Amino acid sequence: MTELRCRKTETLEGDKGEEELQSEPDSQTAPNGADLNDRPVADNTEDGGSVASDGADGQEQKEDDGVKEEEAQDKEEEVNRHEPSIKKSRSTSNWFYELTIDNRTVSGQTVNAVERLSLYPELITSFIYRVTGSQDLMEPIYFYIGAVFGLQAVYVTALFVCSWVMSGTWVAGMLAVAWYVINRPDTTKVDHAIPLRDNWALPYFSCQVAALTGFLSNNINSATEMFCYLTMSATTFTFLLVWEHSHYVLFIQGLCLFLLDSFDLVPPRKMADIHKVYLSSLFLAYLFQFQNPALLSSPLLSLLISSVLARYFQQNMKMGPLVARLMKLFLHFYLVFTTGITFSYLVKKLIPVNESDFILKFFEVKFGLNTTTDFVTNFLLCQESFQTPSQDLFLRLTQASVLPFYFLVLLVCLLSTLQTIYRRLSGEPMKTNLRLEDGRIGEQPEVIYHVFHTLLFGGLALLFEGMKYLWTPYVCMFTAFGVCSPDLWMTVFRWLRLKSIHPVVLALILSTAVPTIIGFSLWREYFPRVLAELSELQEFYDPDTVELMNWIKTQAPMAAVFAGSPQLLGTVKLCSGWAVTSLPLHSDINLLRRSEDTYQVYALRSPEDVYKILTSHKTNYVIIEESICNELSHNKGCRIKDLLDISNGHVVYDRGEIYSFSKHGRFCHEIKMNYSPYTNYFTRVFWNRSYHVYKVNSVISFQY
């Protein structure tokens, strides 16, 4: 919470005064952390209330002059009367414009901060904060935190509704919420990183999935279907707007719907409506994100275009005997696959996208198809989000009783879905008015969608640790639906051909008894623990970092540019507003390359090389962190200095071991010795136990 407190009251207000906006760096909106989508924020609070303080000083100096004191008070009241209009004018005309041409965040670059940092959540929250008059009720930072946690409540509510709609009982919703809360470390990152983009985006995706579930259902009237359609449209657009990676998530969802359509498991009319939602949302997001080329080259758009074209050329795909339909189906998959790749290739040739080649290289290395010494690729592969999940994830889910029941529910639904697919390919029409006695849970389109959904996202979660936050919440929801659904139990009893007890009665009993037993056991074991965790207030306080930030704000010139690790630079930007060389944004390849340059202070490089690199980014001060310079880790190949040595070719391999070797010592160690030639290029101006700050000399002094 140290970073959050640096913001105080200016973050959401954005415009504390006309003079301050002209002299201070722009506010960039969200508190930052150390993850993929963190957003640094400028701070203007030091100058806040300058009018009032000046008035107070005048009153103290002219205490005996009653006339002048009265005049000073009148002038102060006049300024206060006009201040709201000034703020309103600034916010409506210049504030947003300044964010789109921000040249005071990243040194030497003019960036569109709204697009590059995905600031729409903060912009909307700031607007609501001012319109609702919340300035008189709470500080902006608490309003911001409340908005994020409010969205998490929406997230959980959407899971509750989704499980209720699928099972037909609110008990399933309660069980889904209970499992979600118990497995918080694996369902959400909001506990330890509030301002992440996915914390803003995933609640909208959850609402979109709930609306899609209702839209696919056969047992809804036209009014409910229209409501689900409109909700799905709004949440899909919002999801695309607030998170730069959302189109990849919707691509996986699009694959699930593509399979539903290919196997003729959903009416063509509904698929056409869903395609309209995707295309219109992509178009609007493209406009609101300032013609973002990544959306035009996104796999989602390629899938939509290729599936429509393939369907146009295969109008009789869903007709004929089983063998003919299978051949047509394979041809359909081939057409969609080749057309999608061709479309994506042409778009990338016409509209170059910087990240396209890099992403391909990343996946080649991730899946062992290639090796690389590239720092950025290896740096990302070492991030926890891209690591293979440990066994602890599955152990925790098993201890909470989610995983055993999940496999049971998934097995029954998957087998029933395969039966339905076989019947459809054999020409048997799909029943729309299912009864409990039929025991065909796999013929419900919404259930089939969630089977594909959990399989695809589950496969990705087995490869990437970060994908568990897209999979585990729906594991909780899907499992709760299954154990509470009489249709699932009835399907099992029909397979077993149970005759001793009436299967319908037994299905109804089990769909009530099983979740009741599970809920009671969860309440007994986890309820006191969860209450204790939720009531515990934790705050991180690092005195060395606070000391560094205070020094920067009081001693560094306003035009100074700082270099250091991206995480620390995010804190510098957040607490002081000074320009930095990079930001902790792992989705921007250009910023990652700049981070690689500033990380060279931890490499085996000469002071001349480091000086040239830092001055190329207009750096005035460089911050060296002891935690990185003297990093100790069991995973030796993932330390920053190891990645730099591999990238710079400063390693020697001997009997399977990696040793660093260079004619130069490690820069972060050597510069602390204060001898030439290091003192020729750098001058130490601040240090404590954790940080050393060196000024990059504008004029090189040769000392021997």
Image (cartoon, grey):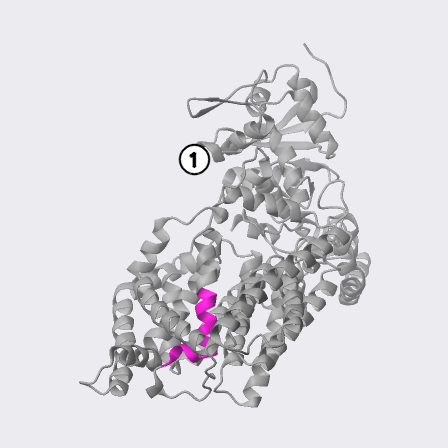
Secondary structure at badge 1 equals: loop
Residue at x 60% of width, y 71% of height: 235
Q: In which quarter of the image is residue 593?
A: top right
Question: Could you tell me if residue 155 is visible in this image?
Answer: yes
Q: In this view, does 458 lie above or below 543?
A: below
Q: Which amino acid does label 1 sit on?
A: Asn
Residue at the left extreme, as displayed: 500
Question: Could you tell me if residue 139 is visible in this image?
Answer: no
Please rate how many residues cluster around mark 1, counting C-alpha atoms within 10 Å: few if below 14, some from 14 to 19, many from 20. few
Q: Main secondary structure of the magenta part?
A: helix
Q: In this view, does 496 lie above or below 531?
A: below
Q: Is residue 608 above or below residue 405?
A: above
Horizontal placement of 567 versus 619: left or right?
left
Asked whether 670 or 169 is in front, the reply is 169
Asked if residue 484 lies in the magenta stretch, the reply is no
Residue at x 69% of width, y 51% of height: 44
What residue is shown with label 1? 635
Asked whether 331 or 350 is in front, the reply is 331
* Magenta stretch bounds: 440-454
Q: In this view, does 23 lie above or below 638?
A: below
Q: Quadrant of residue 493?
A: bottom left
Asked whether 351 or 531 is in front, the reply is 351
Q: Quadrant of the C terminus?
A: top right
* Residue 31 in picture, x, y percent from top left: 59, 53
Residue at the top extreme, as displayed: 704
* Residue 40 in picture, x, y percent from top left: 63, 49
Horizontal placement of 699 versus 404: left or right?
right
Asked whether 250 or 456 is in front, the reply is 456
* Residue 237 in picture, x, y percent from top left: 64, 69
